Image: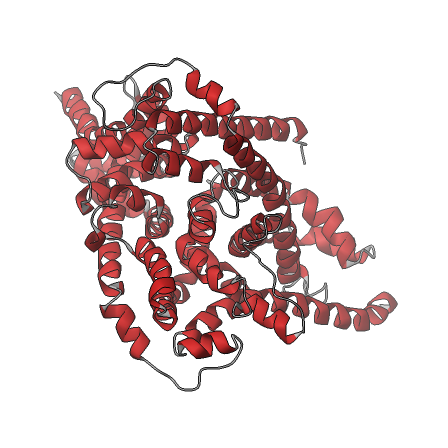
């Protein structure tokens, strides 16, 4: 009786979440793998299987390779730039006050800075995108170009120059992300015992030396977590690019990424099968990245 | 002692430089926001004449236009309703599932746990096409109910993962005592375990509220057909496109300011909880 009640309780607590999750998450994922082998257009009642044709087409598709190149650049630049800026700022915030008195202290006003830095994180990405449309306007009416005009320079097509557009978008991603990692790294730095810094400072280490010899090695795990999160973010970026560069990743596909291409292929061109094949490719890319990163991390892990 | 004396002036310079670096970044964050806010009071000619000048007068008509004509009020209300029910549902079902999976041993419990966690590995774009058709089959396309259910479903993997880890850390003794005293399993959960898990629940609630408030992709796909039901992110993107045709730029910036201000107020009030909630959420 008691056992039965227990099982009833367990089943009762699980039935709704498992059902919702199975219907709206797992079943679409499974269907995506299935549809990636078809040429389904979204409305016809006949679903024709084409085997691996979609994947063959994908390999010959210039847009796909362009998107991959853009992901590659994002994957390289976004984590490095964000982490370097965030580490620098959080070091200044937490340890920049020097070693006077009882241990290390943050600079004056560090709490205020942290509140300001973190704020973009709570703004919706779509809102940030619209905001930066005004900042990046190509004529002299844009905020950035207005500043340049004052300095006597020609206006720059931040989002219209093919060589520049993706960098402008990465800058917005960094702008939004840095505050989060400042908070993350600050938490990590606060966990480092103060005696380490005091001992090193007594031995005459300067602040730069403290950073590279103590803070950075002990912050390693936190930085790696940040690296994985930013790497995963490099495979997304949909809202920002859709708002700033449009459905096609203007100019001329220079900013196109897989999520944008998937959305367009499925809902504008009605090629659901082909879009699913792209989704499967994106899935394997993300998983490969995660597995490779985790394996490297495990191998490098040192006992402290 | 001598080292400390010679060290002081150098510290002063370095401190100064630190403040410069920090202030530069703070300005980079604040200026675009401030510019948007000021632009909402300007006229079209003021915005385009010289983007760096201050508004000639404080004009509030653009705010009125954004609220009524551009339906910002409507979008806001839609978002609040969807996020409220989405987060509430996520927390109720997520904590129930996490609790059972973390603290009860039964056949298949590990399997169901990994079934949930596996959802973390898939990018949402993979499911996009099929999800549209699943939701359509249930007749829930262009409805808030459908969007809420989808939000709950997609928030479950991380919520279950995070809360299961949290429930595992809670001591057994209290729950056992309650059961011996004759409380049912359900009552033990709601009256004993939920209050004990409060810190974890708060963190993950903040995480979900922000995530669902920011969602753009899912409403774009699932509410496309009915603009009256749109959420704020969709609304802003549309107003931004329209501003180009109707040449109502102050209206766009008023709409943006209206979206940003409430978030800013909530953030300033709860900044400590939000910062720790989000960063502990990501550190597991």
- Rendering coords of residue B90 (x, y %): 27, 42
Looking at the image, which is closer to me, A244 or B120? A244
Say whether residue B170 is visible: no
Say whether residue B273 is visible: yes
Residue A202 vertical position relative to residue A41 in the rendered view, above or below: below
Residue A231 vs residue B14: left or right?
left
Q: Quadrant of the N terminus of chain A?
A: top left
Q: Residue at 71%, 64% (x, y): give it.
A: A98
- Rendering coords of residue B47 (x, y %): 46, 75
Looking at the image, which is closer to me, B83 or B206? B83
Residue B177 vertical position relative to residue A106 in the rendered view, above or below: above
Picture colour scheme: secondary structure
- Rendering coords of residue B30 (x, y %): 51, 68
Residue A258 vertical position relative to residue B272 in the rendered view, above or below: above
Q: Quadrant of the C terminus of chain A?
A: top right
The image quadrant that residue A50 belongs to is: top left
Residue A214 vs residue A174: left or right?
right
């Amino acid at each position: 009786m008691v056992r039965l009640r227990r099982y009833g309780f367990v089943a009762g607590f699980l039935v709704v979440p498992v059902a919702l999750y199975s219907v709206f998450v797992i079943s679409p994922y499974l269907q995506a793998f299935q549809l990636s082998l078809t040429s389904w257009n979204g409305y016809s009642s006949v679903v024709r299987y084409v085997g691996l044709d979609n994947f063959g087409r994908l390999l010959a598709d210039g847009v796909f390779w362009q998107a991959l190149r853009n992901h590659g650049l994002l994957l390289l630049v976004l984590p490095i730039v964000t982490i370097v800026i965030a580490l620098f700022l959080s070091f200044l915030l937490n340890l920049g006050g020097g070693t006077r008195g009882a241990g290390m202290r943050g600079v004056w006003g560090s709490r205020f800075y942290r509140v300001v830095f973190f704020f973009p994180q709570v703004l919706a990405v779509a809102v940030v995108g619209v905001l930066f449309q005004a900042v990046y306007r190509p004529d002299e009416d844009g905020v950035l170009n207005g500043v340049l005009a004052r300095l006597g320079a020609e206006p720059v097509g931040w989002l219209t120059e093919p060589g520049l557009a993706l960098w402008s978008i990465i800058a917005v991603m960094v702008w939004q992300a840095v505050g989060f990692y400042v908070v993350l790294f600050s938490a990590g730095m606060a966990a480092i015992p103060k005696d380490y810094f005091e001992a090193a400072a007594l031995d005459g280490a300067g602040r730069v030396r403290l950073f590279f010899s103590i803070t950075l090695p002990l912050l390693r795990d936190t930085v790696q977590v940040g690296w994985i999160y930013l790497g995963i973010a490099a495979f997304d970026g949909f809202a920002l690019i859709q708002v700033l560069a449009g459905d096609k990743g203007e100019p001329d596909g220079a900013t196109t990424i897989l999520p944008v291409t998937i959305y367009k292929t499925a809902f504008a061109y009605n090629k659901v099968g082909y879009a699913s094949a792209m989704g499967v490719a994106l899935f394997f890319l993300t998983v490969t990245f995660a597995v490779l990163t985790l394996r490297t991390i495990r191998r490098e892990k040192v006992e402290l | 002692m001598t080292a400390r004396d010679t060290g002081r002036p150098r510290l002063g310079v370095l401190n100064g430089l630190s403040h410069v670096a920090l202030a530069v970044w703070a300005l980079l964050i604040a200026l675009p926001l401030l510019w948007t806010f000021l632009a909402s009071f300007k006229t079209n000619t003021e915005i385009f004449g010289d983007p760096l000048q201050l508004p000639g007068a404080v004009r509030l008509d653009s705010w009125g236009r954004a609220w009524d004509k551009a339906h910002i009020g409507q979008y806001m209300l839609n978002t609040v309703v969807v996020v409220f029910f989405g987060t509430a549902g996520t927390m109720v079902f997520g904590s129930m599932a996490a609790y059972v999976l973390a603290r009860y041993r039964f056949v298949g419990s590990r399997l169901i746990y990994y079934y949930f966690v596996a959802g973390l590995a898939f990018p949402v774009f993979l499911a996009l096409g099929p999800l549209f058709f699943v939701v359509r089959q249930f007749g829930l396309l262009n409805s808030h109910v459908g969007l809420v259910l989808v939000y709950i479903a997609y928030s479950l993997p991380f919520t279950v993962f995070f809360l299961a880890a949290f429930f595992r850390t809670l001591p057994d003794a209290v729950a056992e005592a309650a059961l011996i005293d004759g409380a049912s399993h359900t009552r033990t959960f709601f009256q004993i375990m939920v209050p004990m898990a409060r810190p974890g629940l708060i963190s993950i609630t903040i995480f979900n509220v922000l995530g669902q408030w920011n969602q753009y992709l899912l409403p774009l796909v699932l509410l496309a057909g009915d603009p009256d039901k749109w959420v704020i992110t969709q609304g802003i993107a549309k107003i931004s496109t329209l501003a180009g045709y109707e040449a109502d730029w102050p209206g766009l910036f008023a709409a943006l300011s209206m979206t940003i201000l409430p978030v800013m107020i909530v953030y300033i009030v709860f900044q400590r909880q939000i910062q720790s909630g989000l960063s502990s959420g990501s550190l597991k």
